[in-house]
Amino acid sequence: MSTARPAGFAHRQAARSRPEPRLGGLARFESLAFLLLTVVLVGVSGGLLWALGLNYDGISGSAPSKIHPATYMAVALVGWTMLRAGNPVIPVAQALNRRPACVLLATCGVLLLVLIAARGGTGLAGSIDTFVLAGLIPILLMDRDTATLRRIETIFHLMMLANALLGLFEFASGQRFFPFRFDGMAFETDTRSAALQGHPLVNATLTACYILALAKGGGRLNPALRAGMIAVQLVALVTFGGRSATVTTLALGGMVALFALNRTLRNNRIPLIGAACACFVLTALPVMVAVLAAVGFFDTLLSRFVSDGGSAQARVDMLAIFDAIPFRQLLLAPDLLQVSTLRRIYGLEWGIENSIVSDVLYHGILVTTLLVVAVGLYLGEIARNCRRGVWLPILTFVILINTFEGLAGKTTMLAKFALMLIVLFPPAATRERG
């Protein structure tokens, strides 16, 4: 076995050890504003807002409370960027030139808002938080200095760690602190951990994408911290009870591990410490799994596989709704009252478990196609501005958002995911600069 350092190790270590440049007063204020935006975006859920007295996820209450605080902050930062530029046309032109897909997504969010309002529908704020906020995040971060991006990355890691630890504590204590609530009503029969993200499936999706991002080398964590974070997140993923997220993470993560092992063996470079750790993990893993199973740690997840609470039947019933709606209405815009009635008939009041199907039923095929294309171009644009390895978490995200209502409802999940990709997979030139 060889203990030789890989090529470029000394260069990366030197780059990491360089002191970060000092920021001026105005730049420091902007950096703090982006750090606060990260905390609010990743750490503040509808359940937490309910605890603070804001009915974010429900129907009743004031209209301003239906928009996430992170959206207000992002819009304020966009306004500040225009004000600082002196000529508001300049940042707009830069965004159109460098982030056209982000502008398209934000524009689609505004147009969807207008469409919903014109049809007298509900959930106007959903289009703003789901698409407009997601479109603004990459635009705001495209000219950030390396020091700020690194601080945002650190905050993101800390928030994900806090989310995982809170999920584990909720599992151990049996108490959910910030569960998803619709007009104050929580799913009392749902015992899955809610943590900081509120909704268990949002938790599972974000955690799965984060695990695979780390597995593909995302972020600046050293190997020991990276392995520890992946382990903590994997354990927390079980408490969130996402079956699709768990299976996807294990399948894709296992493929990554096998390719990495094959590459290491072919290069004939196996660090002694790494080999020792691998032997220890392989030996201790069966014992740890057996102990956790004995204390009932996997009971919640296994019960989801044994009895899914009607989830599989709901996926069958949601397709049956199409039979009762004429194709012309499906193409343009189905009748909202008819869709709501059909949902009650088929027992789908709590959601249609597929983002695209839900959008088709509420907004029609044409609008849904536009949204799907916009999201696809948006993710592709982010990927082109990131380094290698970004496509695995993107693939995971695309798979998982179509296992529940995902982007069809009001959520900040797409904005969180975009932030994750930008700070964990910056271009190589950005990583070495600063």
Image: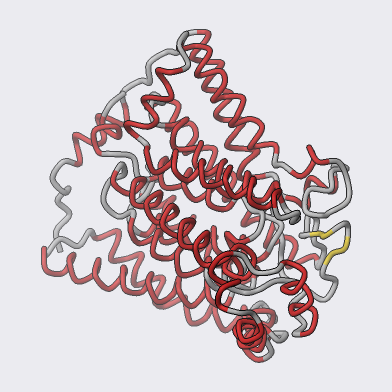
What is the x, y in percent for residue 223?
A: 36, 52
Q: Is residue 7 left or right of residue 430?
A: left
Quarter of the rendering containing residue 168: bottom right
Image quadrant for the N terminus?
bottom left
Quarter of the rendering containing residue 373: bottom left
Q: Residue furthest bottom?
A: 306
Instruction: Report the residue at 24% width, 30% height from top.
Output: 14
Give the vertical position of 298 relative to 220 (above or below).
below
What is the x, y in percent for residue 189?
A: 82, 76
What is the x, y in percent for residue 271?
A: 22, 58
Colour scheme = secondary structure
Give the camera-side residue of 179 and 343.
Answer: 343
Quarter of the rendering containing residue 432: top left
Give the vertical position of 147 relative to 366 (above or below).
above
Instruction: Report the residue at 47% width, 30% height from top.
Output: 140
Give the camera-side residue of 227 and 90.
Answer: 90
Give the camera-side residue of 8 and 397.
Answer: 397
Image quadrant for the C terminus?
top left
Give the camera-side residue of 388 and 432.
Answer: 388
Viewer can see residue 294: no
How many marks do you count on the picture? 0
Q: Is residue 47 left or right of residue 293?
A: right
What is the x, y in percent for residue 58?
A: 82, 54
Q: Is residue 330 left or right of residue 193?
A: left
Viewer can see residue 96: yes
